[in-house]
Amino acid sequence: MLKSLFNWKVLANLLLAIGVFIGLVYLTFRWLEYHTNHGQEIPVPNVVNKSIHDAVRILDDAGLDYEVDSFKYDPRFRPLQVLQVSPSPGSRVKNGRAITIKVNPKSWAPVAIPDVINKYSGLAFQRLDQVGLKVGDTIFEPSIQKDAVLRILFKGNVIKPGSKIPRFSVIDVVVGSGPMRNIVIPNLVGLTVGEAKAVIGRNLFEVGVVEHEDGGQDDSNIVYYQDPASGDARDQGMQIDLWASKKTPAEMRLRIDQLNSMYRMKIDTTLAPIRYEEVPVIPEPINEPVIPAPRKDVPKADATKVSPVITKTTTVMKNDVTKTAATPAKTTPAATKTDITKTPVKSVDNATKTTADKPKAKKVVN
């Protein structure tokens, strides 16, 4: 068994198989190096903040492929300005590698005008703001559709719903301000139906019933009658009915008289107006209830106040003064004369005065 393994033929086949395997591996790696340009790398140039035209020229000179992608529009940067490069600038890539360039668009992405015609202006403004449109001037125009959107203007031109304009564009809105009052109706007799319709529209009225004599719908027929009549005053939006025929108004005189009897009735004001008498109305007397006069309350008399009485005590004082006259020694008896002098009576307010307040006695000598 072992001898058969070490046979030279077996060893030769084994060595041949190993050589073939190594050769295939070597050739594979060489082919990969050639196919992938191994060792041949190109640095990515810095084209950030450059315009897209300059960035494309630089990448073409470097032998690099590129793919242009747009960001969301940012008004802080210039239109068509390169904002980002992938792979980043300075990294090394193989020849033919595609470079992705992010560019700022020229303007916002376009949006479609919503259908807000004949809608209430408040709701229409909200809808326009939701899609990213700004309302500039609000123009009011006489119309029977008060506060309704009549037209949308973009740069002075009428734009229809569904049209696309850049986002955040400024648009003007025409809103109805209500009908005009007392507009004089124009004369339409003698015009064709087509001309009469145009005149009615210019004068802010509406076309009502159009009756053709032959029952057709030919706008070349001549109008021989209209209602209301020319010269009358009507509000904007009122309808004007027309009667038309192939014949002229002079040839339709009988028909005009019939229509006048129906639509032009005149009131005879020559007769004196009838006066009616009125029954006199005597008002019934109204018995009003007698309201008694308000009773006045007499204030009660207060109890009599007794003032205290102060009693004065009078003290009478008498002082008898005996006057003695001394006579010389005579044989005649001595005469003694006594005078009694009375002191006046004085009033004392208070009986409790002390004796110190009493007057002193006076001695009188004759």
Image (tube, rainbow, N blue to C red):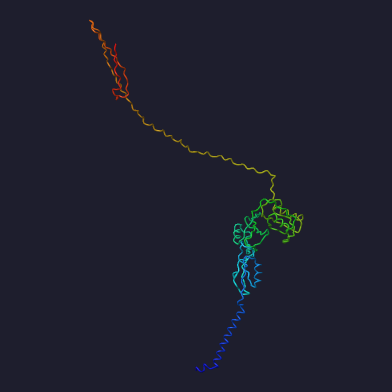
Res 242 → quadrant? bottom right
Between 133 and 224, the one nearer to me in the picture? 133
Residue 276: horizontal and vertical position, in percent? 63, 43
> Is 25 situated left or right of 158 in this image?
left
In the depicted structure, whether residue 139 falls above or below residue 313: below
Q: Give the total of numbered labels.
A: 0
Q: Where is residue 44 in the image (x, y as percent from the top left)?
A: 61, 71
Toward which corner of the image does residue 211 lie, by quadrant?
A: bottom right
Q: 269 or 205: nearer the eye? A: 205
Q: Which quadrant of the figure has residue 97?
A: bottom right
**242 vs 191, nearest the viewer:** 191
Which of 45/363 is in front? 45
Left or right side of 245 for 13: left
Residue 22, given in percent of the width and then of the height, sits at 57, 85
The x and y percentages for residue 108 are 63, 63
- Judge whether 180 appears above or below 333 on screen: below
Which quadrant, please, contains the C terminus? top left
Does 28 appear above or below 220? Answer: below
Question: In the image, is 302 to the left or to the right of 96?
Answer: left
